[in-house]
Image (tube, rainbow, N blue to C red):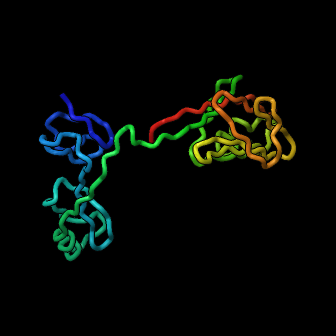
Amino acid sequence: MSRVCPLCYAESDDNALNCAKCGVEFENADTGNDCDVLRKYIITCPICGKEYEVESASSTIDKCDNEDDEFDKIQIRSQRARVVEIVKQSKEEKRAAKRLSLIDVRTDKIIIIDDAGGIIGRSGDFESEYFKNNPYVSSMHFKVFCQDGEWYVEHLSNTNPTTVNGTKLLHDIRFKVNDGDRIIIPECCLKVSIKEELI
């Protein structure tokens, strides 16, 4: 039998007091894992502000990694742990985020786009080396970005086109893309893959 951490969902031994993965304290047997609040115990160095996670409210730290003289050691030994309460977040409460990948249909190369978005091209933010040998792909060919949970592309090149499902994009005008759409730039067809993940 194992205990499932209500914060990170890792499994620990049934008798464990803390999660083996994230270290958060399990609630006692009376309340099990159904509590609304989890607790961590933190000691802060009064000299440099570095934080240390300890086992309980009565735990102490002998010395700070950043401070060496005896006065500093006495200072941190006198500190008591403070309780940091973390509200439990269930799987249902976790925020759903859409992740976008571009898949070259000819080579199966996958280009993963993070939440911040960025530029696709020979000098772009994602896999720019992949486009280096294609003289028809501009240095900054198109931008991919997420806004209000939806993904968009914006054509940037002054010399070479970008089309989505046959629609030629206008310069600096955002165009919404969906899962399965095909973005075509010279000598390259990129299939859009959008998947929803819990973060």
Q: Residue at x 22, y 63 (%)?
A: 82
Left or right: residue 180 compared with residue 160: left
- Above-or-below relation of 184 to 30: above
- Location of residue 130 in the rendering, given as x and y in whole percent from the top left corner: 69, 35
- Location of residue 198 in the rendering, given as x and y in whole percent from the top left corner: 45, 38
Q: Residue at x 26, y 47 (%)?
A: 36
> From the image, which quarter does the C terminus lie in?
top left
Q: Residue at x 28, y 69 (%)?
A: 67
- Location of residue 145 in the rendering, given as x and y in whole percent from the top left corner: 65, 45
- Above-or-below relation of 69 to 50: below
> From the image, which quarter does the N terminus lie in?
top left
Residue found at the far top of this picture = 106
Left or right: residue 44 compared with residue 176: left
| Residue nearer the viewer, 81 or 50 | 81
Query: Which quadrant of the view contains residue 194?
Result: top right
Left or right: residue 117 compared with residue 15: right
Left or right: residue 177 compared with residue 167: left
- Location of residue 92 in the rendering, given as x and y in whole percent from the top left corner: 39, 38
